[in-house]
Image (cartoon, rainbow, N blue to C red):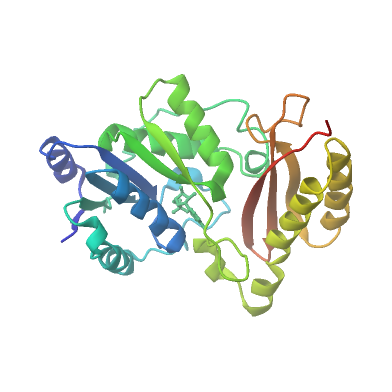
Amino acid sequence: MIEIIRTLNQFETFRNNLRPGTIGFVPTMGNLHKGHLSLVKESLRQNDNTIVSIFVNPKQFGPNEDFEKYPRTLGEDNKKLKDLYRDEEFRGRLLTIFAPEVPEEIFPSNFSTKITVGDLTNKLCGINRPGHFDGVTTVVYRLFSIVKPHKAYFGQKDYQQYLVCKKMIEDLRLNIQLVPMPTKRDEDGLAMSSRNQYLTGTDRELALVLPQTLEKLKETIKSNFWPESYGLALELAGESKKEGDWDYLEILDAKTLREPSERTHTVILAGALKLGHTRLIDNKLVEIRYAR
Ligand code: AMP
């Protein structure tokens, strides 16, 4: 059986009495799909105890974003986790959901601390979503301090978020291991996202431009030597941006999110595409090849 804990008090009591063993943590905003579930499975495999949090974090939404309409589907999420947990593979592992019912328990009205990671946050999604990453790091820190995990599982679909949280852990020496997990996609290549359900029929088709463009850029970089491949990919990105409403489409060093340099080994191809009121993000990592 999976326990669902809905108050901070109950969670703290649960946490203080948790049986010995490693604790894996999967922070989510709910509306779970196979991408989220792949993180939960990996945590169940690697840890004695797994905690999944479900909390739509008000601090990471801008004033004109979709906080109010973000899908809240706790009953269905619970069922999906139950189905997954039934697997023989996870026998003896403990899975618990922490889904605070009252958001003020996580952020009381007088909460006045903000965690800001510099540099990595002032590009890509940080440009058109000011304050977004402060909201992410603040809630992740807050949840870490409640859950006190050994490992935390993050999806590479939100690669910048993963890097920013990793930097926070390093800088604050939090002693938590971040485990990056590959992006789960629908059969046609679109990265799974809770926001995909906002897409109407034709927009769902147009959305494929995002993974397809990233794939073309990847092929260009893989089939040429650096830095020629970079030049060709930049040209292709420039052309691709003319079609569709792109927030960004960039080729950056995967470690620093800066322009690639002679020290770059892996680049990230990152895109954000707008379809009506919906904004989708995706990325691919590519190792670059130098001619010998
Ligand atoms: P969210 O509920 O959107 O905040 O996501 C919770 C976690 O699931 C984050 O670490 C995301 O990166 C991860 N995630 C979301 N979509 C996917 C996906 N398609 N594949 C893998 N991980 C994902």
> Which part of the image, by quadrant, shows the C terminus?
top right
Instruction: Pinpoint residue 145: horizontal percent, then vertical percent.
Output: 30, 32
Instruction: Pinpoint residue 114: horizontal percent, then vertical percent.
Output: 45, 29
Residue at point 83%, 62% (across, down):
243
Residue at point 58%, 40% (across, down):
160
Quarter of the view holding residue 123: top right
Instruction: Pinpoint residue 95: horizontal percent, then vertical percent.
Output: 23, 52
Compared across the picture, whether 139 is left or right of 94 comes to right
Q: Which sits in the foreground, 225 or 259?
A: 225
Compared across the picture, whether 221 is left or right of 95 comes to right
Compared across the picture, whether 168 is left or right of 65 comes to left
Quarter of the view holding residue 85: bottom left
Above/below status of 276 relative to 66: below
Residue at point 49%, 44% (across, down):
60
Residue at point 26%, 36% (across, down):
146
Instruction: Pinpoint residue 80: horizontal percent, then vertical percent.
Output: 32, 67
User: Which residue is farthest bottom?
Assistant: 201
> Which part of the image, by quadrant, shows the N terminus?
bottom left
Visible residue check, residue 238: yes
Count of numbered badges drawn on the protein: 0
Above/below status of 254 relative to 280: above
Visible residue check, residue 115: no
Q: Which sits in the foreground, 292 or 53?
A: 292
Compared across the picture, whether 282 is left or right of 289 comes to left
